[in-house]
Structures are given as structure tokens and as C-alpha cells.
């Protein structure tokens, strides 16, 4: 249990030990004997050693009590990110991590990095090391508008707010719009990194099920009607319409149009998160919600983390002018401005290199890895398992037989040096217990095969245990590390195991 999860009772407050009677005093009171002097019975408090500048201070084991009363009420509802919890474990070199949404930065040419940094240092070193405007440097905004234009979304560069990654956009939108108890509507499952942000701002999150065409707009309309009958109005709808994280599915054009229409009819803001739109491996590109909306009710979140580098922490937002103004004020209070060095690096890179060519290289590599993962899942997953087949992006969403709990399964998987994100990390209501998210972009093809094989082995062990308890034969599949004799479908084939997200109440529900 982390410090954030612990909820101290009033008896744990600082100074309570001084007010609480000692056991000796209580016994004396019951017997009628005079109580001993508390000062004489209580040993003196151990002094806190002064820091000598060299030896680290040894913190007492009861340190939580020292600070518990200082924590804000918000810390009691704050959640940790499912990915953050795994980062330390997956840093171990022996662990095959299918957990993170990692871009493969080894694909970035080292000579390009050296040249761009050298030219930037020679031409703009003073500006790179200086503060910049909160809205972002003028040089980078046309670059970000160029990225959006590649998806058919034309925007005015002056309207772009540069942020410290796409994650900050989510935080700023919540800071700008959400009071404790306000309703936020999102997909189920949703981006695991958004879950702790919604929780920190004490939002009441309503999650809408998905299928192979993304968020089910019919269920969204039912939820909005139900909320209206209760006198509640959502502050915004959060969606990742293209190659959704973690589901891997893409919202259809018909649903995109209807969602924007609902936003206009009911005057509800929509936060469109679009980190993966340019990482398409097949199918036709669809218009962004922002391009369909015209900038009236859609807030757009973009990032270079997946198509250039997550380490530079460059994202951006577009929003209706009054909302953007409040977001700028909120950002100034958070970090003053995003890194000038990172922004100038992007500007120089776009000027001197073909960023589109680098994205195409990434897409080629990731598509091959996706195909390897789908093949490995066909080989190693047991009957009763379903998964999505993404046309782009970085993730596949699996739903396992109902008796498997992926949170417990992760502990077993880590013993086999493989990691994934348990499904509960993508929900705020406890759902997703038998689901998981796996990533194929940040690992090699051999690591994907071995990682999926290890997960299959752990699932097989669990199913054998459940079968032995129930006295029934276990489902086939779930081979050991040595592989399986089951035939393997080619990635382009239609395989019974590669199915879309199912809605609640239907077979093998995942959303």
C-alpha cells in the first residue's frame, strides 16, 4: 500500500500520542490507585538527527503520522497510474515489457540527433537555455500545424498552445473545467494515464462501452439523457477516436459525425486525444473530430511522443478561445513554459530533416511487430480469449476467460520476466478484471514472440489450477515456452480469435 492509499484515522494525527493515556495510567484509574506522572512514565522523544551534509537521515518508521494531517483531501482519491507502477520493474533488463506505450527511439538516427543539436547549439544556444512564452515558441507552432495538416486538419499556428507532452493537455483541461463531483464522460476502457488525472481532480467519470467502431454513440446518448434527468451535465467527453488506447479500435466516420453533432446540439465540449493518428498500417484515414467541428466544441490534444520522441516532452492543444485562455493561465501556474530547448530542437529538426520519412519508417517497423504479435496471440492464447486487431497505433486489447484476473496474473507473469498492463487500470469502476493491454512497438519481434509465449504459459498454469479445482478439462491453447503445434493464421486472415471489443452483457465482454 502506498502513502497515498493510506487513510489515517484521527487517532493517527500528529500529537495524538501526547493526549492518549498510557496503559499504566489507565490501569491505575481502574484500580483507584493514583496515576503515575505521565512525564516520568513516558520516555523522552527520540531527537531527529541533524543532517550533516553527508550521511542520509534515517527516517523513523512512523513517518506517515508526521505528515498525515497535512495532506489535502484530494490525495485521498488520487490514483497511481498503472504504467507508472510498472516502470521500475520493467527497467530490469531481463523483463520483456509489453506494458508501456513506448516508441522505439532506437529507430531515430543518432547522426541526425547529433547534427540537429550541434546546429541548434551554434545558432540558438542562448534562447534554448532561456525561458519562453507560456503559449510556446513561435518557431515550433508551424511545425505542429504541419503535423496536423498531414492528417487533413488545417489550423492557425498562432492558436496552438505548446504543452509538456499530451498528458499535460488532459491535466490542463481538467484544471480548467472540472470541480469536485463534476461529470466527465469517456470510453471504457480508457487511456490508463488519464485515470489518475480524472481522479486527482475528483471527477465523477462515466465510461461508455465500445465495439469495433469505437465508442458506442447510442449508449453515449442514453447516458447523457440519464444524466440530464438527474440534473447533471458533463463538463466534457474524453475520447481517443483513432487507434484507441488501450482498445486499439477506431471510431467510424458515422459515429464521429454524430458525436460532433451531439456536442453542438447539447453544447458539450469534447476532448479529442490524438497521439497515434499518423501511425496507420492499413485502411483509409478518417477526419479528426476537430476538422469536423470547426473549433467550436472540440479541444484537440496532440503529441510528438509517438512520432518523434517521448523524451522531448512536446505536446500541444487547440481549444475554443475562452477555454484556451484559461488553459494558458493554468499552464503558467504549473510550469511557466515548456522546455525551450525541446521546442527549438523540434523546429531545427523539421527544418533540416524529413520528419514524414521518419514516421513512415516507424510505421513500417510497427506494422511488422503488430503482425508478429497477432500471430503469437493466435499461437499461445487459450480458447475463450479474444483480442482486437488494430489498423494502427501501438496496442492490442485482450479479454481472457472470465475466471482469470489479470491483476493477479501480472504478479505471476513478472516472475516469468514479462509485463503487461492489467485491464482494471483502464477503468474507474472496477471493470476490466479479465482484460489486459499489450504493446508491440517498444520491443523486438523476437521479444514479442517470447513475451506472448510466457504470458500464455502463465495463463495455462492458472487455467489448469482452476480446472483441477472445478474438476473440468482446461481449454486448449496456452502453450509452454516451447511453442504450440496449433496452426497459425497469417495476419491478414480472418481468425476466430481476432474479434472486436464486445459490449457489456455480450459474450466475453470487454467494455
Image: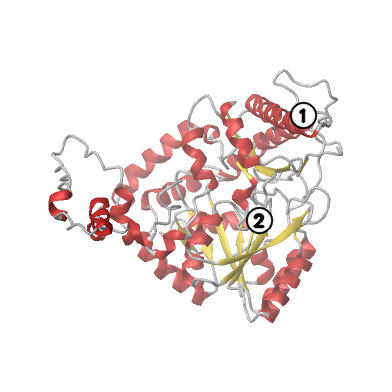
Q: Position of residue 355 (x, y in %)?
A: 56, 44
**Which SS class for mark 2?**
loop
Q: Disc 1 vs disc 2: which is toward the camera? A: 1
Q: CA distance from mark 1 to mark 2?
A: 53 Å
Q: Residue at x 18, y 57 (%)?
A: 35
Tell whether label 2 touches label 1 (CB within 8 Å): no
Depth order, front residue of 318/97:
97
Q: Residue at x 12, y 50 (%)?
A: 40
Q: Is residue 121 left or right of residue 169?
A: left
Residue 117 falls in which quadrant of the image?
top left
- Relative to 285, say whether 468 is above or below: above
Residue 80 seen: yes
Q: Which residue, given by chain and number where applicable, does mark 2 sit on?
A: 151
- Residue occupying the far front of the picture: 32
Q: Is residue 256 left or right of residue 57?
A: right
- Relative to 4, say whether 476 is above or below: above
Q: Position of residue 65 (x, y in %)?
A: 31, 53
**Which SS class for mark 1?**
helix
The circle on residue 468 is 1
User: Local crowd at mark 2 within 10 Å, few (<14), some, or many (≥20)?
Assistant: some
Depth order, front residue of 344/415:
415
Q: Position of residue 96 (x, y in %)?
A: 58, 29
Depth order, front residue of 80/402:
402
User: Local crowd at mark 1 within 10 Å, few (<14), some, or many (≥20)?
Assistant: few
- Residue occupying the far top of the picture: 482
Q: Is residue 417 left or right of residue 3?
A: right
Q: Quadrant of the C terminus?
A: bottom right
- Relative to 338, say whether 384 is above or below: above
Residue 152 falls in which quadrant of the image?
bottom right
Residue 183 falls in which quadrant of the image?
bottom right
Amino acid at each position: 500500500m502506498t502513502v497515498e492509499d493510506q487513510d489515517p484515522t484521527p487517532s493517527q494525527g500528529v500529537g495524538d500520542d501526547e493526549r492518549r493515556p498510557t496503559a499504566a495510567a489507565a490501569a491505575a484509574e481502574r484500580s483507584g490507585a493514583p496515576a503515575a506522572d505521565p512525564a516520568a512514565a513516558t520516555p523522552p522523544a527520540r531527537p531527529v538527527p541533524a543532517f550533516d551534509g553527508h550521511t542520509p537521515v534515517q527516517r523513523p518508521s512512523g513517518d506517515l503520522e508526521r505528515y498525515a494531517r497535512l495532506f489535502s483531501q484530494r490525495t485521498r482519491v488520487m490514483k497511481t497510474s498503472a504504467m507508472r507502477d510498472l516502470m521500475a520493474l520493467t527497467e530490469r533488463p531481463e523483463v520483456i515489457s509489453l506494458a508501456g506505450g513506448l516508441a522505439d527511439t532506437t529507430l531515430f538516427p543518432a547522426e541526425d540527433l547529433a547534427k540537429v543539436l550541434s546546429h541548434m547549439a551554434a545558432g540558438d544556444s542562448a534562447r534554448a537555455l532561456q525561458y519562453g512564452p507560456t503559449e510556446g515558441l513561435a518557431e515550433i507552432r508551424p511545425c505542429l500545424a504541419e503535423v496536423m495538416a498531414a492528417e487533413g486538419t488545417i489550423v492557425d499556428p498562432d492558436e496552438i498552445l505548446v504543452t509538456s507532452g499530451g498528458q499535460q493537455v488532459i491535466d490542463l483541461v481538467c484544471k480548467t473545467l472540472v470541480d469536485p463531483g463534476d461529470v466527465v464522460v469517456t470510453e471504457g476502457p480508457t487511456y490508463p494515464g488519464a485515470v489518475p488525472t480524472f481522479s486527482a481532480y475528483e471527477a465523477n467519470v462515466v465510461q461508455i462501452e465500445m465495439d469495433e467502431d469505437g465508442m458506442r454513440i447510442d449508449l453515449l446518448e442514453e447516458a447523457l439523457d440519464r444524466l440530464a434527468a438527474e440534473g447533471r451535465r458533463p463538463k466534457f467527453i474524453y475520447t481517443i477516436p483513432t487507434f484507441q488506447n488501450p482498445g486499439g479500435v477506431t471510431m467510424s466516420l458515422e459515429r464521429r459525425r454524430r458525436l460532433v453533432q451531439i456536442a453542438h446540439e447539447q453544447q458539450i465540449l469534447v476532448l479529442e486525444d490524438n497521439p497515434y493518428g499518423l501511425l496507420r498500417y492499413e485502411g483509409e484515414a478518417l477526419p479528426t473530430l476537430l476538422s469536423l467541428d470547426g473549433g467550436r466544441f472540440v479541444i484537440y490534444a496532440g503529441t510528438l511522443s509517438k512520432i518523434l520522441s517521448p523524451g522531448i516532452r512536446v505536446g500541444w492543444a487547440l481549444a475554443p478561445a475562452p477555454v484556451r485562455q484559461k488553459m494558458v493561465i493554468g499552464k503558467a501556474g504549473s510550469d511557466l513554459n515548456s522546455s525551450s530547448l525541446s521546442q527549438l530542437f523540434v523546429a531545427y529538426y523539421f527544418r533540416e530533416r524529413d520528419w514524414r520519412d521518419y514516421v513512415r519508417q516507424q510505421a513500417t517497423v510497427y506494422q511488422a511487430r503488430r503482425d508478429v504479435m497477432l500471430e503469437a496471440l493466435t499461437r499461445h492464447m487459450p480458447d475463450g480469449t479474444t483480442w482486437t486487431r488494430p489498423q494502427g497505433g501501438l496496442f492490442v486489447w485482450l479479454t481472457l476467460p472470465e475466471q482469470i484476473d489479470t491483476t493477479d496474473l501480472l504478479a505471476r507473469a513478472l516472475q516469468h520476466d514479462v509485463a503487461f498492463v492489467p485491464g482494471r487500470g483502464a477503468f474507474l469502476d472496477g471493470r476490466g478484471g479479465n482484460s489486459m493491454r499489450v504493446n508491440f512497438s517498444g520491443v523486438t519481434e523476437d521479444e514479442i514472440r517470447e513475451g506472448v509465449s510466457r504470458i500464455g504459459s502463465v495463463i495455462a498454469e492458472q487455467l489448469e489450477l482452476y480446472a483441477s479445482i472445478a474438476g473440468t478439462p482446461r481449454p486448449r491453447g496456452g502453450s509452454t515456452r516451447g511453442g504450440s503445434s496449433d496452426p497459425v493464421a497469417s495476419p491478414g486472415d480472418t481468425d476466430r480469435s481476432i474479434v472486436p471489443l464486445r459490449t457489456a452483457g455480450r459474450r466475453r465482454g470487454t467494455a
